Amino acid sequence: MHPLNPPRSIALIGAACGLGGADAGPAGAPATLRRLGLTAVARRLDLPAAWQPDILPSSASPAALPDLLQRLAGAVAGRLDAGELPVVIGGDHAIAAGTWRGVGRAIGEPPGLLWIDAHLDAHTPATSPSGHAHGMPLAALLGHGEPGMTSIDGPTLDPGRVAVFAARDWEAPERALLDTLGVAVFDRTAIERLGLEAALLRAVAIVGRGGVFGITVDMDAFDPADAPGVACPSAGGPPAGAMLAALRRLARRPDCIAIEIAEYHPGRDVAGQTGRLVCDLLESLLAPESGELKAWERESGARNYDPLPVVLARGEGSLLWDIDGNRYVDMMAAYSAVSFGHAHPRLLAAMNSQARRLAVTSRAFHNDRLPAFLRRLAELTGFDRALPMNTGAEAVETALKAARKWGHQIKGIPDGQAEIIACAGNFHGRTIAAVGLSTEPAYREGFGPFPPGLVQIPYGDAAALAAAITPRTAAFLFEPIQGEGGIVVPPAGYLAACAEICRREHVLLIADEVQTGLGRTGRLLACDHEDVQPDGVCLGKALGGGLYPVSAFLASEALMSVFRPGDHGSTFGGNALAAAVATEALETLIDEGLVERAEQLGHHLLARLHVLDTPAVADVRGRGLLTGIEIATGHGTAREVAEALARRGVLTKDTHGTVIRLAPALTIPQDQLDWALDRVAEVLGDRSGRRARAA
């Protein structure tokens, strides 16, 4: 791996050229990208950047192109002479004939050139079907073709140090010229054979051989699904996510001398998708290394997390990639927030569509998305009403407020004396009330005093609940399975027994299903395993489809009726964007049969874990796709196991110090699940000094 280049000042040079094609639309790219915040890309990467004066054509005639190219070459050479990194923003791709001659002029020799383009752009006037100059710049840089393009001051490129990447659309004379000259062409067939990343590494090795190199990207290199706003779209290109990952940090190499981005057509970019991709492309090319990013987080962020030492950059389904291109199977799904997998296409489409139409207006007004969300959520779960919030902790706070008000107004508990019972080992969030209910010293230390009326009892002990209830008890708040407590499954019949006790004693039964709800355990709600219908339930995490924070408190009419306008609310809760995403998440859950899938895969997962033959495992427990492996004493910490799994390509997190959580997306393919379980067996075998056997 090449060392990263020390940060340089970025000189953004707009080449507002539309002279090279039939459509002058790309000439508007520099102005549009200014408005989209291209400068801010460099700024957030801690790289000083400034726009230089745009290079404008002297007239609208194609005859003005040579003059524009000559001035562009001079501007590029001047910025290099000043020690800056030129980033040329086109314009059509004819500008390349000026950019790279200017680079060669400044360094006194031809640079290598990585030409990323769906087309070869290697026509001459004699071979071009259209005669448009944007199809000729590579031939001109190699010394062939239009005199007005070949005569720009600067050296001709060495064909042995030029590589064309992602090409898939050309005429035979272009390919014949490049093949004759010895230019390497990594077309779609070559990329499919080698793999995108491996092919790009070969291309970079060619252009970087023996000197500095530059990168020119025609935005039509990307698949039109990701980059519709281009002058000449060509189907079958590499997907944007994979391409950006492969290009990451390439321009930070000390031998990368300049960048050029061309053929963005703002007039065809109705939703701004391609303009955003240009910004993402520049950010990827200039991205810092993982150590620098972690240092920024340490220096500028509160130290309230201790994450595993990976820096993730991309996710798709149950796969994640870090910024170094390493691939992982995600076996944690963001504590169930990503139950549908990363970047689920249906949910992304719903989010993007709604975000363009209406996002946030507050609850001061009605919106057209919330009613359907509330109605569908109530229908599916069997509750009368839902109160939308944002995070799981907010849903729990809403439940606590509802329970206390119910206790005072309906049950007749004296004002200020209503009590809430919760279980030892619980996790209901990080708010003061939730922490007050916790028995975990690390969550409580230094945060008191806590609200009064919060009572804790042992988990899984229905008799303890019965003994703790007093005339002041308003509600019993519980998790059907304790997640952060170590994936603790209560004894069979516990939920039903607690429900009966609460009914008998006129106490509300409130389930915190923020983590267990929406199919995670193989039922829509984990309470359904014992046919228990609580008075209220808290949902969150998966409700937002892994894309947006959405939560809700659902309750019976009798409980929810305690709220009146002004009693409780949230600026963002129930906004149109949240409602659209959450509604689509609910429908996706049903349409894809994910509840049933979680049950089936959960049986498979637990069966494989139960036959692990290693003394490193003290216990295996769970339900559906929420499982935990307790690490036996003397075989290392769960954190050490999680770090070892990360080194093998599996991401998850320890919980409660001794337990490894395995809770993948409900959409995980079985082959990926089995691959991850094989790695789990290997790591646990290593902890015990012998290979673990897994079915």
Image (cartoon, grey):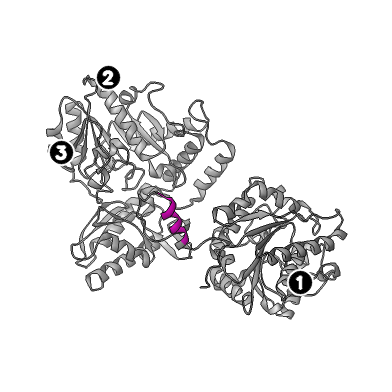
Marks 3 and 1 in Cβ contact (< 8 Å): no
The front one of 232 and 3 is: 3
Horizontal side of residue 594 vs 367, given as left or right? left
Residue 185 covered by magenta stretch: no
Horizontal side of residue 257 vs 196, given as left or right? right
Residue 297 covered by magenta stretch: yes
Q: Magenta segment, which residues?
A: 292-301
Q: Position of residue 48 (x, y in %)?
A: 60, 56
Residue at horizontal 48%, vertical 62%?
A: 323
The front one of 230 and 101 is: 101
Instruction: Name the amino acid, label 3.
Output: Ala
Relative to residue 215, is residue 467 depicted above or below? Answer: above
Task: Name which of mark 1 and mark 2 comes first in the sequence.
Answer: 1
Check disc 3: other Cα within 10 Å, few if <14, some if 14-19, many if 20+: many
Disc sitting over residue 409 in the figure: 2
Disc 1/disc 2 C-alpha distance (Å): 82 Å
Horizontal side of residue 77 vs 315, given as left or right? right
State the image quarter where residue 306 is shown.
Answer: bottom left
Task: Name which of mark 3 and mark 1 comes first in the sequence.
Answer: 1
Relative to residue 570, is residue 544 depicted above or below? Answer: below
**Local secondary structure at mark 2:** helix
Using the rendered image of the protein, determine whether residue 399 is visible from the camera's viewpoint: yes
Question: Which tag is nearer the camera, tag 1 or tag 2?
Answer: 1
Check disc 1: other Cα within 10 Å, few if <14, some if 14-19, many if 20+: many
Relative to residue 409, is residue 473 depicted above or below? Answer: below
State the image quarter where residue 189 is shown.
Answer: bottom right
Instruction: Name the amino acid, label 2.
Output: Gln
Q: Position of residue 345 (x, y in %)?
A: 51, 50
Q: Mark 1 — residue?
A: 141
Q: Mark 3 — residue?
A: 462
Residue at horizontal 16%, vertical 36%?
A: 465
